[in-house]
Amino acid sequence: MEAVQDRYRWQALGTLCLAMFMAMLDNVVVNLALPRIGRDLDAGVSGLQWVAEGYSLVYAALLLTGGALGDRYGRTGVFRLGLALFTAGSAAAALAGGIGALVAARMLQGVGAALLTPGSLAILRHVFTDERERARTIGLWSGVSALGLSVGPVVGGPVVDAFGWAGVFWINVPVGVLALVAAGRVLPALPGRARRIDLAGLALSAAGFGALVYGLVEGPGRGWTSAPVLGCGVAAAVLLGALVRVELRLAEPMLELRLFRDRTLAGALLSGLMVSFGMFGAMFFLPLMMQGVMGWAPSDAGYAGLPMTATIVLAAPLSGWLTSRHGPRPPLVLGIALCAAGLGGLSLYSGQAHYWSYLWTLVVLGLGMGLTFTPVSIAVLRRVAPERTGTASATVNTLRELGGVLGIAVLGAVLTGRLGSALATAFHRLGLPADGVGHAVAALTGRTAPGAAPAPPAVRAAVDGAFVDALHLALRSGAAALAVTAVLVAVLLRPAPGAGSGKGEPKETPSEVFGSGVRIR
């Protein structure tokens, strides 16, 4: 295989970071455009939900497929195909004249992101061969990925105000074209390897994860006991159970379940899942409090996250340095603990709190998130054979994406349950009729019908207080889940007896761990 010329290495890193930034940005950037989309395309709440979640649904369902295809047909070629599809989907979304066309375009973006994401880390491994330099570059790569997730609300509000809702999609097109040109010039050609295509695994993983994510997305709106949601849950359990049985029987499975027998990899995968669970779940509801309770404009709510964004960018390279020196255990445990502390700290402030009083919690959250992204990727690269990096990377990103959806669903259920009981108590105390709850919630979320009378001050105050109380419970639930995760990761990643490396993991070659078989300790 032809070596990468030195002068192209950093250009290759820039290309990979640019593509990952776009893929991560599109998870969140569209949220602030939803009210304008609903008005211009005459879309209801259900349609707007699918504009936001259609991308995540396809992305999570096809990530494992993207990793397997990259391993088989060549990571660079599949990466370029994904980038092209993502760019085309962005243009189609910007030109969409109806809600159905927009959702379809968002799903095409998700297909592209699922194809390009697994290959990005695998190409990075090939370009940077020195372990210390690789750790630093993975820190930059992870920081840019995290930046895309955190900067979405900051970018979305001003773009929508200046260019309309289509602007959040048009910004991807020139960037995608530039990345495609750069990918053709600076990325190394990485051929695939001869292996049997796991067609059963491809079908079962796409259908199983798709049913799971669909059920989680629809659960809060339709009700967890509704027939469609229960049907999706049953289908997901059956399909994913079948996937496990099929993959355990194959010599070269698409989903290498033996990863979870290795303590270091299990700890890394658990970290990625639970950080997304706690952070995405809790942060999803903060804009509702800022805009619904505090009365902030969308742009102001986006700008409020800038300190967290800046801290993530600074912390990600630091975590790469810490991991190269001390292994993944210290930055992972510290990062998860800081995320727990930040969420717990946020739950101490009311809806009338001044921004500067809780600014420290956003900095702590940014530091925690920045510390956790890089060690997970480095742990996978160190302990997985090079030819299986794409599949392993897809597993990591699938768990992260599912963690975010699970967090929104589970913490959303906590918030909704507490909100309902708190409102019932408040309405009873005020002597208000129970049928006013629907109007009260609509006033909070901005979903009142055109021309509807504003909620009475007493009702509005009751809703605001109930929502803040429910949000506090959701934040504390997320903090508790992360605190437990920090303890579990500390145990899973503790140095094995006689390891002697001082880096939190034993000295093993990748083939001993994930190539010719995972070593069970």
Image (cartoon, grey):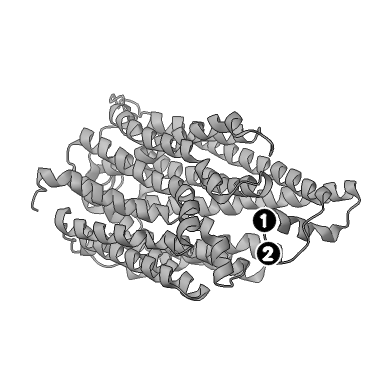
Disc 2 target residue: 225
* Disc 1: CA contacts within 10 A as few (<14), some (14-19) or many (>=20): few
Provide residue 279's location: percent of width, then percent of height. 52, 43
Provide residue 423's location: percent of width, then percent of height. 79, 50
What residue is rendered at 44% in x and 46% in y? 151
In front: 200, or 422? 422
What residue is rendered at 68% in x and 64% in y? 225
Give above or below for 458 relative to 70: above
Disc 1 target residue: 445
CA–CA distance in space, label 2 to label 1: 24 Å
Q: Quadrant of the C terminus?
A: top left
Q: Amino acid at mark 1?
A: Thr
In front: 429, or 234? 429
Give above or below for 234 relative to 420: below
Quarter of the rendering containing residue 329: top left
Q: Amino acid at mark 2?
A: Thr
In front: 130, or 345? 345
What residue is rendered at 77% in x and 60% in y? 439
Residue 20 in view of the camera: yes
Provide residue 255's location: percent of width, then percent of height. 36, 57
What residue is rendered at 24% in x and 47% in y? 14
| N-terminal-most mark, 2 or 1 | 2
Quarter of the rendering containing residue 499: top left
The extreme front residue here reads: 162
* Disc 2: CA contacts within 10 A as few (<14), some (14-19) or many (>=20): few
Q: Secondary structure at mark 2?
A: loop
